[in-house]
Image (spheres, rainbow, N blue to C red):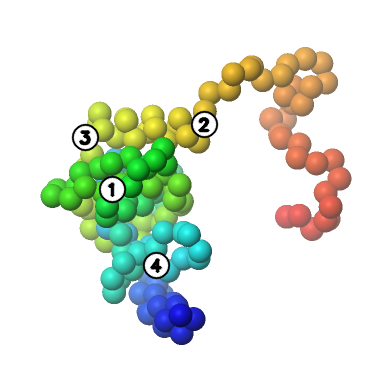
């Protein structure tokens, strides 16, 4: 088992290293599904398949011309609130909300399809319902309260346990 994983990591390195030299001139937009070279990951993180360690990824949020938040697509139906079904050409798969991560456009290989706006809005609504649920009570307000911060800074701890936090 360890030997197979080691061999897979070496094979992935052969694919990954050239990505650093790849021209980042890929034009992409939100709502598109692309083949992306995801690679070998750790534990329960989703990984790519085949010799190029690739899988379909939905461009969920474009940050700039180089990076985006992507949602990997699984090649079979998976039930649960962390998944939404998607039909891609002649197959049904599942968009995995629990595997959201940032991707560089250098990982993109080929566009598979563009989702209809109405379908992409459903994906966005489901994602936001899971990651940003509406709170039942309003945030605190008042004198000296941590929400009244003129610098718009969140104070995590007054005294960090370690001085070299950054």
Dot 2: within a 10 Å radius of its alpha carbon, few (fewer than 14), some, or many (20 or more) residues?
A: few
Q: Is residue 108 left or right of residue 90?
A: right
Residue 85 screen position, x and y as percent: 28, 41
Give the residue pinned by disc 4: 39
Of 31 and 67, nearer the camera is 31
Disc nearer the start of the sequence (4/3): 4
Q: Residue furthest top?
A: 142
Give the residue pinned by disc 2: 132
Q: Is residue 157 above or below residue 117?
A: below
Of 138 and 114, nearer the camera is 138
Dot 4: within a 10 Å radius of its alpha carbon, few (fewer than 14), some, or many (20 or more) residues?
A: many
Q: Identify the residue shown where x is 58% and y is 22%.
A: 135
Within the image, what quadrant is residue 17 found in? bottom left
Q: CA distance from mark 1 to mark 2?
A: 24 Å
* Of the two numbered discs 4 and 1 in the rendering, the one whose residue sits closer to the viewer: 1
Q: Are marks 1 and 2 in contact (CB under 8 Å)?
A: no
Disc nearer the start of the sequence (3/2): 3
Q: CA distance from mark 3 to mark 1?
A: 20 Å
Q: Is residue 3 left or right of residue 152?
A: left
Give the residue pinned by disc 3: 116
């Amino acid at each position: 088992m360890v030997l197979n994983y080691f061999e897979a990591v070496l094979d992935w390195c052969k694919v990954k290293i050239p990505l650093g030299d790849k021209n980042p001139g890929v034009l992409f937009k939100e709502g598109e599904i692309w083949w992306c070279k995801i690679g070998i990951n750790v534990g329960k993180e989703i990984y790519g398949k085949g010799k190029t360690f690739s899988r379909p990824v939905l461009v969920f949020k474009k940050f700039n011309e180089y990076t985006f938040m992507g949602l990997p697509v699984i090649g079979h139906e998976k039930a649960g609130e962390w998944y939404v079904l998607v039909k891609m050409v002649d197959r049904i798969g599942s968009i995995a909300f629990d595997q959201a991560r940032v991707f560089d456009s250098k990982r993109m290989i080929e566009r598979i399809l563009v989702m209809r706006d109405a379908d992409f809005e459903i994906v966005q609504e489901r994602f936001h319902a899971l990651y940003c649920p509406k709170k039942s009570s309003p945030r605190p307000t008042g004198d000296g309260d941590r929400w009244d911060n003129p610098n718009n800074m969140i104070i995590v701890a007054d005294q960090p346990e370690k001085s070299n936090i950054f």
